[in-house]
Amino acid sequence: MKRDLDRRLEALEEMLARALNGNHNMQRLRILFITGIRLGILSRLDRDLIMELNVRGPSPPSELWTIVEENHHSFLIVEHNPLHHEGARNMAGHVAQALKQASREATILLYAPALDRHLETMAELAVPWSSASMTWRELG
């Protein structure tokens, strides 16, 4: 079961990285990558194509909220880490509002290996007209 999940995660990360690497407009963008648990997408990004990439380490929700609010990049890749939200009940809503605000000036890619209640809350609040999540059942 764990090996199957790992293979699916790697396939998803590869698919996302190929999509990003295949878009030559990426070289014009200022990109901020906020890491979560895995670095699968980050390690697959074409550094020759992506000229301006800043990376921030895993952050608890309060720091993530601040990072997103202070964003000056045109593209944000946020690797969701559900463990960082444990014990921080109301922070998913604050992070969602910060992502929603940032999306007015930047493209946001919120990535997670699986749907959890914190990600679901953020998706519903940041994009109220649509569920912005994809579960493993939909992928495989």
Image (cartoon, helix red, strand yellow):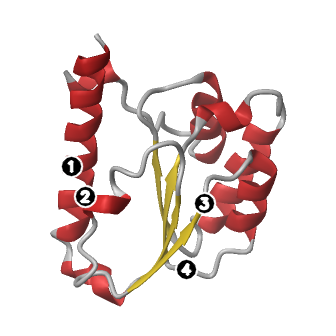
Which class describes the residues within 10 Å of circle 2: few (<14), some (14-19), or many (20+)? some
* Left or right of residue 27, residue 123 in this image: right
Q: Which residue is mark 4?
A: 73
* Quadrant placement of the N terminus: top left
Picture coordinates of residue 119, whole percent (x, y): 58, 34
Q: Closer to the camera, 37 or 50?
A: 37
Which class describes the residues within 10 Å of circle 4: few (<14), some (14-19), or many (20+)? some
Check the image and report above or below for 33 versus 11: below
Q: Earlier in the sequence, mark 3 or mark 2?
A: 2
Q: Are marks 4 and 2 in contact (CB under 8 Å)?
A: no
The kind of secondary structure element at disc 4 is loop
Which class describes the residues within 10 Å of circle 1: few (<14), some (14-19), or many (20+)? some
Q: Which residue is mark 3?
A: 57
Q: Residue furthest top?
A: 1
Q: Tell me what residue is drawn at x 20 percent, y 80 percent.
A: 24
Picture coordinates of residue 47, whole percent (x, y): 28, 79
Q: Tell me what residue is drawn at x 72 percent, y 34 percent.
A: 85
Picture coordinates of residue 10, whole percent (x, y): 24, 39
Quadrant hosting residue 100: bottom right
Residue type beneath disc 2? Ala
Q: Nearer the viewer, mark 3 or mark 1?
A: 3
The kind of secondary structure element at disc 1 is helix
Alpha carbons under labels 4 and 3: distance apart: 16 Å
Q: Which residue is mark 2?
A: 17
Picture coordinates of residue 51, whole percent (x, y): 34, 88
Quadrant hosting residue 138: top left
Q: Are marks 2 and 1 in contact (CB under 8 Å)?
A: yes
Alpha carbons under labels 2 and 1: distance apart: 5 Å
Q: Which residue is mark 1?
A: 14
